[in-house]
Image (tube, grey):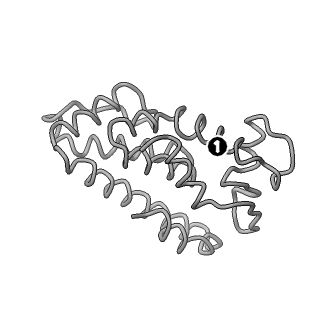
Amino acid sequence: MTIDQMIEATIGKEGGYSNNPHDTGGETMWGITAKVARANGYSGSMRDLPRAHAVAIYRQEYAIKPGFAAVAEIMPAVGEELFDTGVNMGQTLPALWLQEWLNVFNRQGKLYGDIKEDGQIGPATLAALRGLKMSRGAEAETVLLRALNCSQGERYKVLNQKRPANEEFAWGWLRNRVA
């Protein structure tokens, strides 16, 4: 899956303008929060955020910068999952979950070495991902995707337990974001 395909799939889930009072992200357009838009040079009304500007933000801030595009080159579905989750809940958690699961799946270092669990995808994380793919074969991507979705679903449950106003979004989060 290409970066453009990942972005198009996510924009389709995020939709247009939103300013739900229950959403801690506040005002959004194309799934981009006002805070992120401002940090990326946009100063106009969020209702008027050009789609092209949102795409550029997605490409740089949510695909390339956190390393999800690099993951997609190795395992396309995993890269897409990390990207989409990163848009929904920030880039650090999905990167951390990837690292945690890579360490869980390495058979105590027999398949490849443990990596630092810091939420930063770099050469060691990518090498471990390649190691998983090489050692576990074609099903590596499917099982890793399931694992990531388990972590994401658990996170949504915890968010709802801690903040009941999130129940406004729980059904949609699970319906649209957890396979």
Answer with left or right where residue 10 lies relative to residue 97. right
Instruction: Please tell me which residue is depicted at 74% across the width and 43% down the height of the picture.
Output: 37
Q: Position of residue 6 (x, y in %)?
A: 50, 48
Answer with left or right where residue 42 lies relative to residue 137. right
| Image position of 15 with respect to 128: above or below | below
| Image position of 16 with respect to 124: above or below | below
Which quarter of the image is occupied by the C terminus?
Answer: bottom left
Residue at the extreme right of the image, as rendered? 44
Q: Which of 65/111 is in front?
A: 65
Q: Which of 135/166 is in front?
A: 135
Residue at the extreme left of the image, as rendered? 110
Instruction: Please tell me which residue is depicted at 46% across the width and 38% down the height of the picture.
Output: 68
Instruction: Please tell me which residue is depicted at 65% across the width and 61% down the height of the picture.
Output: 15
Q: Position of residue 82 (x, y in %)?
A: 45, 47
Question: Residue tagged by mark 1?
Answer: 55
Instruction: Please tell me which residue is depicted at 50% across the width and 66% down the height of the picture.
Output: 176
Badge 1 amino acid: Val
Q: Disc 1 on helix, strand or loop?
A: helix
Q: Position of residue 120 (x, y in %)?
A: 46, 33
